[in-house]
Image (spheres, rainbow, N blue to C red):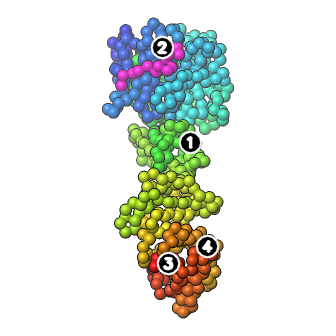
Amino acid sequence: MKNSLLTFLILGVFSYTHAQIRRPLGPPVNTPEFNEYAPSISANNKTMIFETDRAGEGKWELYYTTKNEKNKWTVAKPITNINKMGKENDLIGGPSISYDGKTLFFFASFNGGQGDMDIYFSTWNGTDWSEPKPVGNTINTKAYEGFPSVSADGKMMYFIRDSFSKRKDKALCYSIWASKKQEDGTWGIAEKLPAPINGDCEKSPRIMADNRTLIFSSIRKDGVGGYDLYQSFQEDDGSWATPINLEYINTEEDDQFASVSAAGDLMYYYTSGDIYTVTIPDKYRKYKLVTVDGKVVDVITKQPIATKITSKSNNNKEKAINTVVDANGLFSMIYRVGSKYEVSTTPLNDYFPYKGSMDMTTAKETDNIEKNIELIPKKIPYQFQLLDKETKAILKDPKVKVMDVETKQLLEVKVEKDVVTVTVEIGKSYKFAANALGYTFFSRGFKPDTADVFKDRLKKISLTVLKKDAIVQLQDITFETGKADLKPESNEELDRLVGLLEGNQTIKVEISAHTDDVGNDDSNLKLSEKRAKTVVNYLTTKGIKGDRMTAKGYGETQPLVANDTDENKAKNRRVQFKIN
């Protein structure tokens, strides 16, 4: 049973003296009969992992607690996949959850380790923590390695190492080491931090969300009791500032294992067998930080995407922030309050890179900011549905072809419930052709762009019933300028008309040609007559009998729209057929 009264008296006097309120976390996290030790808080301040002796018989394990919808901590539960690896007397402790919440580092005395204690890691798979693995022999040695802490950018690991060769005031003493992550994802050879970090007796380093503020426990001349908490800042040249005694926390007890929320405003730490919290005074905070949580997803399917996010600040002195996003798509980014960031994602084979911004100029450290990043796929589904032009009824058994204009290859189409689906690539040009039994055909060219992602991509195409006086405008019928010679690109559409006439042997058609109002009226009329005859001649060469077709030129007498723009004039220059 912990001496709660003594703790209360000591802390009460200290709190009053320093005008800083220190609060025990209380139930259901803290318990009267067990120790709660070495807390680690997630970046969003919603998950805490800590070490405890609740298993009894001197065994220490890892437990976790989360906040509910009322922002209250829930009953702590054991992390079974990690704890089950320990034998009867194994120690599992010093948890440190990465800022993105995806990796849990800790130390343990598992069988097969290299030394007294080794550092391990476990990854979150979306539902549970994986079986732990050692971080590697560049960190783990025959000595004692423990209490790891990984920077928010994932590039540095800080930890303690010693062989228990030194003692001070009956306390076990350690030194603080650091390892840098290599390009291949492994940890580099660890190096001992220089003075003024390492003195005679250090313990439990924790690197803060800014990647530069280190809080650790130490026994020093200006200390209050046993282990006290100190803070140092890494300067631009890589050196460490003289550690500052965190007087607003330290007591005559051992004060250790600080964990600070990503916002940098609240500290969780261990003293007198329990986890406590305290608000950090502004003078101890070089920067105010805010956390942005979100997910990288496909803008259409909303499925998660693995990528890397780069955030560049408008403050030239602030380093770019690189955030790796795994297959779950989740990210947690830590920004400085007052800064504005350009945010981009790494180019991917199947997606366009994202470019946007995160404006923290008016943000507050207490804000809970959530923002998803939606990536636009390079290939998107298009859908087509054929309708009767008059009744708007959905046509059964639609026949649709989509061709890549560049490669001339037909794309695979799928038909389900009379809806045709085809996958097309943004930025490429395609030709679409559709027909149904008893109806005229329809064809168009199209070129998908990124704006289509946000539009309704179900295209409803109206077809005209094959009956007397039905008129269909042919697409992409082009002639040499001022002449009646067909260009080769006209053949594709004319061959569709050949197929229609071959499939409907009883119908006869009028082939008509039309011009805009440029030039002489009589010349335009004669030109249109020649062009209509040229089309009929082409159809005749394809086996359509001449008595089923008549050629008619209308010149500029039947415009579809006013000839007041180049675009409208192009619409009026056309070839169409009418069923007689």
Q: Secondary structure at mark 2?
A: loop
Nearest to viewer (mark 2 / mark 1): 1
Closest to the observer: 209 or 29?
29
Q: Residue at x 55, y 60 (%)?
A: 402
First in residue order: circle 2 vs circle 1:
2
Q: Position of residue 508 (x, y in %)?
A: 49, 77
CB within 8 Å, label 1 to label 4:
no
Residue at the spot of label 4:
542
First in residue order: circle 3 vs circle 1:
1
Q: Say whether residue 49 is left or right of residue 8.
A: right
Mark 2 vs mark 1, CA separation in Å: 37 Å
Mark 4 vs mark 3, CA separation in Å: 15 Å
Residue at the spot of label 3:
509
Q: Residue at x 46, y 79 (%)?
A: 580
Q: Amino acid at mark 3?
A: Val
Q: Magenta stretch containing residue 85, yes or no? A: yes
Q: Residue furthest top?
A: 57
Q: Amino acid at mark 4?
A: Lys
First in residue order: circle 1 vs circle 4:
1
Mark 4 vs mark 2, CA separation in Å: 87 Å
